Image (tube, rainbow, N blue to C red):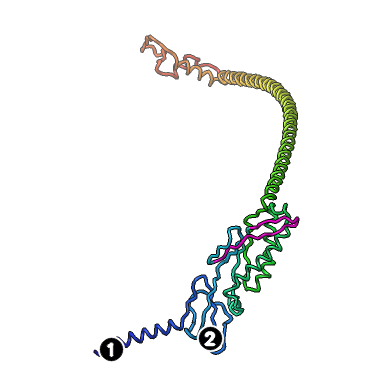
Amino acid sequence: MKAARFFLAVVVLGLLIVGALAAMIETVPVARVGVRNTLWGGAGILEEDFEPGFHLGITGYHKWYFLDQRTHFLTFARQGSRPTSQGRTVEALQVRTKDNNPVSFDVTVTYHIIKGEAYKLVLAGNQEIYRDRLESVIEKVLREQLAQLSSEDIYDPEMRLRIAQESLLPLELEMAQFHVEPETVLIRAVSFAPPYEAKLQAKQLTHQLRLLAEAEKLVEDQAAITEKLSAEIEAAEKELRGDWDKRLQEVDSVNKVTIAEILAEAEVYDKGTRAKASADYETLVADGRLAVDKAEALRNELRNKALDTVGGRIFLARQAAENLQIEHVTLNSNDPSVPSILNIDELVKLLIGSGGKSD
């Protein structure tokens, strides 16, 4: 029993703590900005914007205001008023142009609360009605800006974009009192009264046809210029080609003459060089032969002189004895005066004589 009571007490205490924390914590939703008001003690609105998340907020002591911090839309269109969570649609703007023609504009203006100034909206008590008041302010500024356009200006896209961009500054100045700032101004559609719309469309068509005719004339002029330039370029090209062909032929002729001269000179040089070399060759051959003949004569002279001595005669006799071929010899051993052919020296004496004179 005691354990059950203890467990029950813990659970009750936990619930009380969770309840107390829940009563002291306030959650600022996503895409919202919170403004806290202290109800007791005279503190009032805290001059601070609270981003999405958990913040201190005691139930019964604090009061919270949540304002949408996303982009809002205010659309002026012919479809009528169709309010949404982020914006609303109201009747199209009826404006008179500078040339006093009535015209209807479909315009969308986007805006958002200035960061860090949501609490000022709450301090002024405008957190619920600032969009209604903004509608009249935006309409007034747009009427003033769009009235600067003439009928011709309206169908000029660049002029419409310029006037839309220029409208942002006066809108910013007027909307600052509600602590919001504009983002963009978009002119989505423009329409005149049916009779004038037909006239304007006819005028626009005439204008477009005139522009088309001017463009076609420009195209024709450019085509003529292009053809002229093409002809001039072709003529210049032909002239250059002729000039270069002439230069190439001249250079080719000069080169052929130069080559012929070089070949002739080379042939003359070749023949002259060959003739000179042949003459030199014949002279050298003749000199060589003369030298050989002289050497041969000298050799024979020296040889004859050498052989004309006793030694030479002995040498010749010895060669003769060595080369002597005797097929049949009859020897008489009883006659001692007969020399033996086996004794070369004796045979030499026999051939040259033992009484020869010596040198």
Which SS type dominates the magenta stretch? strand
Q: Quadrant of residue 239?
A: top right
Mark number displayed over residue 5: 1
210 is higher (above) or lower (below) than 79: above
Mark number displayed over residue 197: none
Q: Write the start and end of the magenta stretch as one range.
A: 86-105
- Residue 258 in view (yes/no): no
Three-letter code, disc 2? Leu
**x 62%, y 65%: residue:** 183
**x 69%, y 49%: residue:** 195
The residue identified by callout 2 is 39
Q: Position of residue 60 (x, y in %)?
A: 48, 85
41 is higher (above) or lower (below) than 284: below
- Residue 136 in view (yes/no): yes
First-in-chain label (2 vs 1): 1
Q: Quadrant of the C terminus?
A: top right
Between 206 and 94, the residue placed more toward the observer is 94
SS class, disc 2 = loop
Three-letter code, disc 1? Arg
Between 355 and 104, the residue placed more toward the observer is 104
